[in-house]
Amino acid sequence: MKAVRYERYGSSEVLRVEGVDRPTPGAGQVLVKVVGTTFNPVDAAIRAGYLQEVFPLDLPHVPGIDVAGTVAGLGNGVERFAMGDAVVGFLPMNAPGAAAEYVVAPAQVLTAAPKAVDLADAAALPSVGLTAWEALFEYAGLAAGQSLLVNGASGAVGGYAVQLAARAGAVVTATAGPSHADRMRGYGAARIVDHTATTLAEAGVGTFDVVLNLVTTSPAETAELVGLVADSGVLVSTTADADPDPSRAVRTARVFARSDADLLAELVALVDSGDLHIHIADRRPLAELPAVHAAAAEGRLSGKTVITV
């Protein structure tokens, strides 16, 4: 089968499209015929070797933590799925990934794919959808009536965060450029701050019960975000550690998303009911994954890129 993999840590140049043996599922595993995976910034960080202590790899490694596809084989003890079932999942960070024609996945990370979208596009849901949910409701404890700032709302996690927060009854302010403003309003954002024209400080946005930071920030910018948190509120970030402010009972948290098939099934149900929308910025074939990594390094990716297989 064809797969994209790398034999050493480094830049996007270490990625190669190669012919490799098709894997065989072991006990508790499912062989998935991949239809789609995605690019995630963490893929690049792992490939570059920045996360070796957290996610050690057995090289060569196939990236791709999101998977959408059909069941092509069942290991011993797997009873939840049948051959041909359409599934999605958030794969273990350091296991062989889905940038390949086939991948072996633990059965417990998979759930039935949404029926309302193309199967390849469903790959854009697992890791970022779970990140958004967990950040808002598990880390931040967001509740109806609270105010929320989503800094970086137009990105892959941000789009889900705006939708899920608005659906939960929060009052959402989103930072987004003009090309994304209408989409953010459609998702339920009550206010849009055009980050291309003004800073949050200049916009006079006030304070929020919860601030969700999804963009890379300097220490000074991170501190400014903490300053936008109301007393007894929380800053949650996917990108940077932040110092809490005990004098105002402001706490901070860094998000580390986990795979949760039951929660993912709830998100799938929201997609199928029309209450959660999957936004795809681009679709690229498997052979172009190295180019996608290169584009990300140059800051030329916006939103979620699906890799079709």
Image (cartoon, helix red, strand yellow):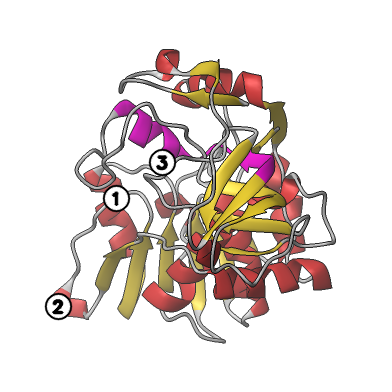
> Which mark, residue 42?
3
- Of 103 and 185, nearer the camera is 103
Magenta residue check for 47: yes
Query: Residue 109: x, y in percent?
Result: 52, 63
What amino acid is labelled 3 in the image? Answer: Val
What separation in Å lies between label 3 and label 1 (alpha carbons)? 13 Å
Where disc 2 sits, the SS reads helix
Q: Residues within 10 Å of mark 2 (few under 14, many from 20)?
A: few
Q: Which residue is mark 2?
A: 247
Q: Which residue is mark 1?
A: 240
Bounds of the magenta segment: 33-48
- Of 228 and 65, nearer the camera is 65
What amino acid is labelled 2 in the image? Answer: Ser
Q: Quadrant of the N terminus?
A: top right
Q: Nearer the viewer, mark 2 or mark 3?
A: 3
Q: Nearer the viewer, mark 1 or mark 2?
A: 1
Query: Residue 65: x, y in percent?
Result: 50, 46
